[in-house]
Amino acid sequence: MAVDAAQAVHEKFLAALAAGALPRRDESPDPAAVGLPRAEAIDIFLSQLTSRQMDRLSRHLQARGEGFYTIGSSGHEGNAAVAAALRVTDMAFLHYRSNAFQLHRARQLPGGTPTWDMLLSFAASSEDPISGGRHKVIGSKLLAIPPQTSTIASHLPKAVGAAFSIGIARRLGMTGLPLPDDAVVLASFGDASANHSTAQGAFNTAGWAAFQGSPMPLIFLCEDNGIGISTRTPTGWIEAQFRHRAGLHYVRCDGTDLVSAYAGACEAADYSRRYRKPVFLHMATVRLYGHAGSDVQGAYLPKALIEADEARDPLLKGAALMTEQGWMTPAEIADAYEEIGATLARQAEAAIRRPKITTPAGVMASLIPPKRERVRTNTPSAEDRAAMFGSDASQMDKPMHMARLLSWALADLMLAYPEIVVAGEDVGPKGGVYNVTAKLHQRFGSARVVNTLLDEQAILGLAIGMAHNGFIPMPEIQFLAYVHNAEDQIRGEAATLSFFSNGQYTNPMVIRIAGLGYQKGFGGHFHNDNSLAVFRDIPGIILAVPSNGRDAVHMLRECVRLAREEQRVVVFVEPIALYMTRDLHEEGDGLWTSIYEAPGEGRPIALGDVGVHGDGTELAIVTYGNGYYLSRQAEKLLAAEGVKARVIDMRWLGPVDEDKLLAAVGEAKRILIVDECRITGSQSEGLMALFTERAPGKKLRRIAADDSFIPLGKAATLTLPSRDGIVAAAKELLAH
């Protein structure tokens, strides 16, 4: 029977110690020459031994059905030396082979129980202090390690954002934030992940910012084991890619040698901390057990290569260092290693008996972040507002379109909350494609109104990372169709953070997106995307769609409150076609404009509040966005024919407050759902189910856009609901 890979590596390590057959370190640096003292070196080595035994134990637990999902750190123990070179306050976004890093960082903060905590995670216990039993993750609130679940580069953009936020905080004089003003940020990943478009975008963003002189204290740690699952990385590829990359300082070290790893990590940390610039730390490693779980490397790698990697085992080189320096004998190393294994085994038997999550409610308990007390640090006076708005103040009592009202609302919010940062393509001096961010750059400066490069992953990653450091980011995605380039930043990173950290880590933000159809004179699919389906199935996020300027102002204020006080991730979709709309029924009526209601004025709109026009009991039209605008037009035509209808603006598409929506429908006998999004995956699907289940006596019909992309020219609205189409559908429903 074939010997398990982990057992084979284990036996080779013990045999080498027993025989004194340890590798020579002739070409490795001397610890004294790189400033590595004896005590530190031994501590790092013990962390490496512990990590190895944890790997072995996790495989044993899985084989017994007591552990879940094993992806080992064996061969990557050099990252313990990186932990030694950094401070506990340097936030670390780690990949899944970073057990040794977390274990060694824990040594820098005495009093913890790192092995017990990690074993609880292995056993999926509800007492796991990072995820509460929801996933085997590396992470710790105390150690400034946000949890990552599967890190094929998706965490790199937010690491860039976190690093960028440090410089912004210094410029703004902000204090008391999670990251000290001299902190650096670490992001680790593998050589295969370095090829991912998300990673390439992060490298480019960091280099782009640093090239222009923006502080970017960030270490990209590439743990290069030469393979991604079964696909080998071409020899020299990583170095060729990054040694001379613009904006990045390149450092190479050997992660299989403790001293080399420490020297490289110290060089990277010192450079990044001193010069506030990004570093690419290229660390050579080996992968000893295959990719994960039951992966058998022998199926796709030659035996000679596997044996060559095993000969480079970091524990063998670490043992060689200990004996060479006279710090530990082979027997002492073997004893320490076996004692660690025995201790962990005893802990594991206790860990697997600890409570598990047993109910759906328990699983979902951390989907919604915990609320927090936020002290308002600035209550702008009338004089402050007058000074900020200048000549605009004299226009605020005149009816304005949505774009102008949103611009003023953003300015008021930024004046009130200094932690708000607006970021996106063209949001600066230009004021955005539709002038929604007009004058914000002039009023608040480039530290709070950030013109980004053209990369939606970078924009959202920037926001997530800044939120990690106490900001309330308001990133702008220029058009709805563009979000699909980066939707995993919302789905896989922003929305999951509270869930996988048991509410300990959050990234509150308000993502503004210009979208939906009906835009005239500028369009096609990429500027008239009429699908919100991507947001509808992401647990925990809030989706808001205003239909008019007054609502947009109050809903945006509520969105910021939800982010600040409830730590929510909010998506705020602004209907492009309604930005500049003034008239409802006929030219010049001005019925789709509003005066600007300053903070504290007017009736607020809370999460879940719906808008109702009319009180008819024959027909309720349930809709949102452009659909509400068109339905208001249809309602007038129906009224002229004696049909009394009410038009309900949902406003909040996720989560839908079902009770408030049903109350708004009231006694109406018939419900017509008008949905401007494509019929497949549209809001109308959920509404049909809701009304069928909770209002079974009512007659239902829906109209939605056809399952088509939107073309140019006069054909742009052919597949979308229309005023006349709503009238016809209403009449047909009323006839039955």
Image (cartoon, rainbow, N blue to C red):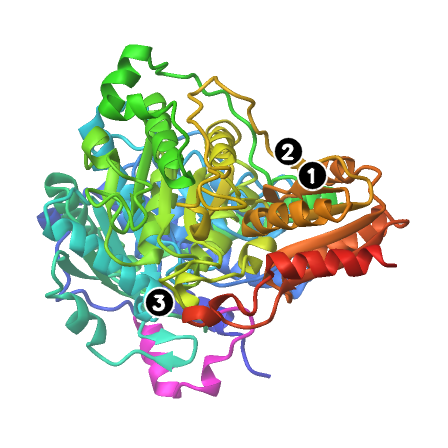
User: Disc 1, disc 2: CB below 8 Å?
Assistant: yes
Disc 1 element: loop
The residue that mark 2 highlights is 609
Please, what is the three-letter code of the amino acid marked with disc 3? Ser
Judged left or right of residue 339, residue 270 is left
Give the mark nearest the N terminus, 2 or 3. Answer: 3
In terms of secondary structure, where does tag 3 sit? helix
In this rendering, which labeled residue sits more in front, label 2 or label 3?
2
Q: Does the magenta stretch include residue 539?
A: no
Mark 1 belongs to which amino acid?
Answer: Asp
Q: Where is residue 456 in the image (x, y as percent from the top left)?
A: 34, 57
Q: In this picture, which residue range is highlighted in magenta?
A: 292-313
Side (left or right) of 597 relative to 669: left
Residue visible at 40% across and 42% down in the picture: 145
Q: Mark 1 points at which residue?
A: 657
Q: Relative to 236, say whether 39 is above or below.
A: above
Q: How far apart are marks 2 and 3 (CA)?
A: 44 Å
Residue 707 horizontal side relative to residue 409, left or right: right
Give residue 193's mark: 3
Name the quadrant containing residue 229.
bottom left
Furthest-front residue in this view = 640
Would you identify the image quadrant in which residue 383 lies?
top left
Q: Position of residue 287 (x, y in %)?
A: 38, 70
Q: Disc 3 to disc 1, how far (Cα)?
A: 41 Å
Q: In this view, does 238 lie above or below 693?
A: below
Name the residue rendered at 69%, 39% in the picture.
657
